[in-house]
Amino acid sequence: MQQTQKELQVTELINEVSLTVTDSEKSNSILQRIPYHFNKLKEGLEEFTKHYPLLTYSLKRIFFSIITVYITIAVVYCLLNFLIDDTTLMIDISDKSINQNGGITGEWYLNRLATRKEKLGLDKPLIIQVLVYLRNVTPVIPKQVTIITSEAGSPLTIYEPVTKWFYLGISLSRDVSGQFGKPVSDMFIKAMPLSFLVGGTGTLLSFCVGIPLGIFVARKKDKPVDTVITTITLAVIAIPVLVIIIPFYQFTLVYLGGNTSWDQLSAFGKIFPIIAIMILVTPGVLVETRRLVIDEMTSDYTKFANSKGLSETYVFYVHVFRNSFIRMARNIPTIFLFTIFGSSILIETMWGMKGMSYYMVRAINFTDIFTVLGFVTLSASLGIMTTLVGDLLLAILDPRVSLK
C-alpha cells in the first residue's frame, strides 16, 4: 500500500514536471515567434512600398502633416488664450443691461459669465481646452457641443446642445445683423466661394501672363528687353505691397468708377481686385519662370542636344520647356493657397469684400479666438495638403523623381 502511494506521488511529480516543461517550451516558442512575425510584417511593408510608392509616401506625409497641424493649432490656441478677457465673452450684453443688474461685479453678470465660460469650455485648465478643441476639429469623432445664440437687443441667450462631426467653435463677435454666436464653419462656408473666386481667378490669370512672359525674357537673356522687364519686375517685388495697391485702389475710385463696397461695384468694377491680385502675383511667377528656364537652357543635356544639330525650337519645346514646367508645377498649388489665404487679405479689406479675410480681420479686432483658430486650422490643413499635391504632381510628371 505504501509502495502504491509512493508510485502515485512519483507519477504526479513527473506529470507536474512535464506540464512545467511543456509550458516553458510554449512560452519559449511564443517568444521565438515574435521576431519571426515582426520580420514578416517588415518584409510585407517593404514589398507594399515597392509596389505602391506614391500611396506609401502620401500616407506618411498625411500622418506627419496631421501631427504638424495639431501642434500648430495647440500653439496658436495657447497664445490666443492669454489675450481673451471677460469683455470679449460678454460682448453681446449691452452696457445698459450690465449697469441695471449691478455692474460687472454684480451677481447677475458673474453668473452669466460663469455659465458662458462653462458652455464654451473656457472654465477648464488650458491643456484640457486644447485637447477638447483638437477633438472638435477631428472630423472622424462625433462630439456633443453647445451652440450659443443671442439676438441684438434681446437679453435672452439660447444654449442649444447639438452633435457635430466637425466643429470650429462659435464667433465671439456680432455679425452685421447683430447676432452673436454664429458658428465659425457657417461663416467660412459663406465666405469661401467669394475668396476662392477672386483669389483663384487672379492667380490663374497671373500664371497665364507670368509664365509666357517669363519664357520670353529667358529666351532674350542679357538683351535690352530682358533687362527692362526684369528690372521692372524686381522693382515691383521689392516695393512694399501697400505702396503699390493703395495708389491703384485710389486710381480706380477717382478715374474708373470704383467703389469701397464690393456689393455696390459694377461688373466692370469687380475686375479691379482681380487686377490687384495679378499685380502682386505675376512678378513672382515671371521671375521664377525665367530662372527655371535659364537653368534648363544652360544645363549640359541642352548643350549636348544643340551640339547634335537639333534645331533651337525643337530643343526648347521638347526639353527645356518641359523640364522647367515640371519644376514650376510643384509650386502652383502652394501659390494658389498663399494668394487666397495671404495676399488677398489686403485686397478683400480695401474693396469691402466679405470673404475669408473680412472675418479674419474682424476676429483679430474683437479678439475672437475661435474665428482666428478656424482660419488657422483651415489654412494650415489646406497648406499642407497643397504641398503634398505639389510633390505628387512632380513625381507624376517627372519619372526621375523617387518619393521615399
Image: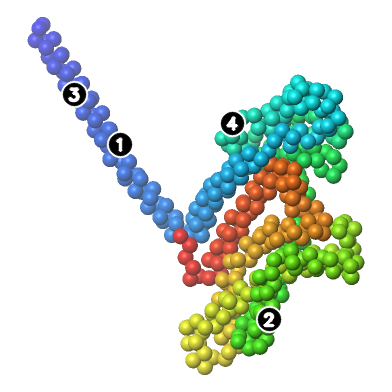
Dot 4: within a 10 Å radius of its alpha carbon, few (fewer than 14), some, or many (20 or more) residues?
few
Q: Which mark is residue 125?
A: 4
The CA span between labels 3 and 4 is: 58 Å
Reading the chain from its start, which is encountered first: label 3 or label 2?
3
Look at 61% across and 58% down and name the residue there. 386
Which percent across, then down, holds residue 145?
69, 33
Looking at the rendered structure, the secondary structure element under dot 1 is helix
What's the residue at 69%, 41% (across, down)? 369
Q: Is residue 102 visible?
A: yes
Amino acid type at mark 3: Val
Q: Quadrant of residue 122?
A: top right
Numbered tag placed on residue 229 in the rendering: 2
Q: Position of residue 400 (x, y in %)?
A: 48, 71
Q: CA distance from mark 2 to mark 1?
A: 73 Å
- Among the two numbered marks 2 and 1 on one chain, the one whose residue lies closer to the N terminus: 1
Mark 2 to mark 4 CA distance (whole Å):
57 Å
Of callouts 4 and 1, which one flags the residue occurring earlier in the amino acid sequence? Answer: 1
Q: CA distance from mark 1 to mark 3?
A: 20 Å
Q: Residues within 10 Å of mark 1 (few under 14, many from 20)?
A: few
Task: Look at label 1 and name its amino acid.
Answer: Ile
The residue that disc 1 covers is 30
Q: Can you say whether 267 is above or below 46 in the image?
A: below
In the depicted view, which residue is nearer to us: 77 or 59? Answer: 77
**Badge 3 is on which residue?**
17
* Labelled pair 3, 4 in contact (Cβ < 8 Å): no
Q: Residues within 10 Å of mark 3 (few under 14, many from 20)?
A: few
Query: Who comes first in sequence, dot 1 or dot 3?
Result: 3
Q: Amino acid at mark 2?
A: Ile
| Side of 134 where 109 appears, left or right | right
Report the residue at 44% width, 57% height from top. 49
